[in-house]
């Protein structure tokens, strides 16, 4: 008995506790708003449509990131096999090339976005 049976119990218990605290605090907040005479629907937040609003440059960002991370992985494999570098070269090359892709995306997006 190493206590492995406690892992699912703690996992589900913690998840239930988070939901209970969230809904309890939400109802307390709404009751306080009603007591002060404020309409709770005024503070509803952004609708779900706004969360999933499509950004025309989103495909470009994810495409650049995927391609550059793939290139970084290939460079890491080359460095590991041919120059006898450590295994950490994979992650380093992938992170460096992914960061480079996001910088390139920033410059492309800043040119395409309308100036205010």
Image (tube, rainbow, N blue to C red):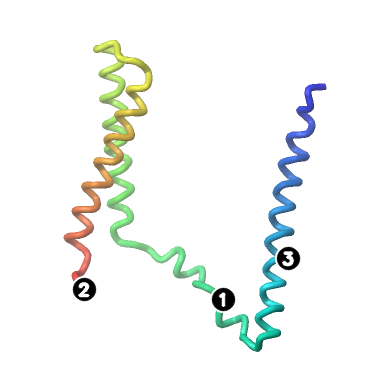
Q: Which residue is drawn at the image coordinates 28% and 30% (left, top)? A: 72
Q: Nearer the viewer, residue 19 or 33?
A: 33
Percent across and percent down for residue 113 are: 22, 65
Q: Which residue is drawn at the image coordinates 56% and 78% (left, top)? A: 43
Residue named by callout 2: 116
In this rendering, is residue 20 above or below 27?
A: above
**Would residue 42 be found to the left or right of residue 109 on screen?**
right
The CA distance from mark 2 to mark 3 is 43 Å
Percent across and percent down for residue 33 are: 65, 81
SS at circle 2: loop
Q: Which residue is drawn at the image coordinates 23% and 57% (left, top)? A: 109
In this rendering, is residue 91 above or below 43?
A: above
Percent across and percent down for residue 114 are: 20, 69
The quarter in which the C terminus is drawn is: bottom left
Q: Residues within 10 Å of mark 2 (few under 14, many from 20)?
A: few
For the residues labelled 2 and 3, say whether their Cβ atoms are less than 8 Å apart.
no
SS at circle 1: loop
Q: Residue 24 carries which label?
A: 3
Q: Which mark is residue 44?
A: 1
Residue at far right of view: 1
Q: Nearer the viewer, residue 56 or 80?
A: 80
Give residue 41's quadrant in the image: bottom right
């Amino acid at each position: 008995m190493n206590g492995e049976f406690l892992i699912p119990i703690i996992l589900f218990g913690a998840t239930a506790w988070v939901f209970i605290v969230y809904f309890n605090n939400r109802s307390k907040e709404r009751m306080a708003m009603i007591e002060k005479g404020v309409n709770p629907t005024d503070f509803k937040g952004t609708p779900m449509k706004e969360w999933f609003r499509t950004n025309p440059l989103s495909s470009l960002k994810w495409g650049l990131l995927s391609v550059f991370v793939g290139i970084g992985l290939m460079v890491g494999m080359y460095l590991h096999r041919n120059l006898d570098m450590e295994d950490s070269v994979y992650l380093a090359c992938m992170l460096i090339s992914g960061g480079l892709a996001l910088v390139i995306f920033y410059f492309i997006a800043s040119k395409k976005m309308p100036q205010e």
